Image: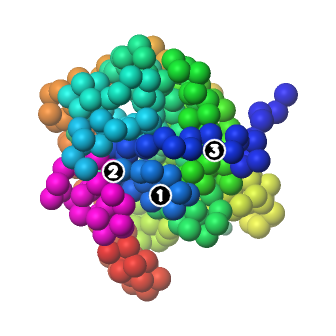
Amino acid sequence: MAITIYTNEDIKPGAIAGQRIAVIGYGSQGRAHAQNLKDSGHDVIVGVRHGGTGWKHATEDGVPTAEPAEAVRGADVIAILTPDMVQNEVYRDIIEPNAKPGAALLFAHGFSIIYHRITPRDDMDVILVAPKGPGDLVRREFARGRGVPSLFAIERDATGKARDRAMGYAKGIGGATGGLLETSFREETETDLFGEQAVLCGGAKELVIQGFNTLVDAGYQPEIAYFECLHELKLIVDLFYEGGISKMHHFISETAKWGAVASGPRVITDETRARMKTVLDEIQSGQFAREWIAENEAGKPKYEALLTEDRSSQIEQVGARLRDRMAWLQTAKQAAA
Ligand code: NAD
Ligand code: MG
Ligand code: MG
Ligand code: MG
Ligand code: MG
């Protein structure tokens, strides 16, 4: 049976009426959630240190702020939207000592719960609302009267209100306008980690770099290789996004299509598929989380070294020079600044 996609009509009117929402962390997700909730008529307060960047942004946006502990004290729903790796400290030092009995702890990603970084107090609801898009899109779509499809999950319903709270919050950020899908903390966490590692961030990046290196090693000009292996990927991804694999097939040449079906499976092989399964196994067993936590505790030496390697690769040098000539990117850069 296909998954249920909930929309605004499926959510109890006043599901979170009269409940105060504290948003802790004012980054990509926090900024979008807080602004959307406020514009939906909810009582929102952002917990940020006075004088910090988050405080500055929230003040500019006209969203009420308080010191994090103060924001938590009055709240019925506490959204923890700091980076995953610091959530355990934020919970221990700020949330647990100050949260009122029966408050809900709301996540946008289940890492801290699934890998036991946080064990919420028994009286608290534990819920998740995760938009399937970055914060700026969540805000932008909401401002246009639309919304980004979102996931919600209930890990613990201590008060009998957990479901209304998750669905009401999701509606408040525009998630039910975009379509709301129910998942579990485990499914959200493991699929999110797998997607970013194997396909979106890790897999796609390596595919691009190795394609580029193959052409350059064979003696082709790096600039030409850059266009073929990195630049044009956007056109293809846009087609996937708009109409799936079929739309891409529809728009590319016969020759490209034949090459795609004949050579694609020779590049991404059963061996790649087996490696993907290993990556998934390590996510499910907790090995990935243990290694990432240990890496953080060691001050991230390997993380920094591997990032530096990516940043100093030839494709990055070549790309920077070519992108300087793409006027439309300069406009986008100015708009973002
Ligand atoms: P971010 O890095 O953009 O912002 C984090 C915010 O937390 C910043 O305002 C930062 O100043 C603040 N912060 C950092 N350390 C802190 C501390 N010790 N105490 C208090 N505040 C602190 O984070 P993000 O990308 O919005 O991620 C937040 C959560 O949302 C994570 O659980 C993430 O997995 C999840 N998520 C993110 C996205 C995304 O597109 N970025 C999408 C879905 C889910
Ligand atoms: Mg994700
Ligand atoms: Mg993620
Ligand atoms: Mg081409
Ligand atoms: Mg071609």
Please determine whether, in this image, residue 243 is positioned above or below residue 296: below
In this picture the colour scheme is: rainbow
- Dot 2 or dot 3, earlier in sequence: 3
Q: Secondary structure at mark 1?
A: helix
The image shows residue 76 at horizontal and vertical percentages of 43, 35
Residue under label 2: 46
Find out whether residue 60 is within the magenta segment: yes
User: What residue does disc 3 label?
Assistant: 14
The residue drawn where x is 44% and y is 23% is 102
The answer to whether residue 202 is above or below residue 313 is above
- Specify the segment rendered in magenta: 46-65
Quadrant in which the N terminus appears: top right
* Horizontal side of residue 183 vs 133, given as left or right: right
Residue beneath disc 1: 38
Image coords of residue 329 (percent x, y) = 43, 78
Figure quadrant of the C terminus: bottom left
- Mark 2 or mark 3, which is nearer to you? 3
Q: Position of residue 291 (x, y in %)?
A: 30, 23
Pick the front one: 40 or 177 = 40
Q: How many marks?
A: 3
Q: CA distance from mark 2 to mark 3?
A: 21 Å
Is 33 contained in the magenta span?
no
Amino acid carrying label 1: it is Lys
Q: Secondary structure at mark 2?
A: strand
Residue 160 picture location, percent across and down: 59, 21
Q: Which mark is residue 119?
A: none
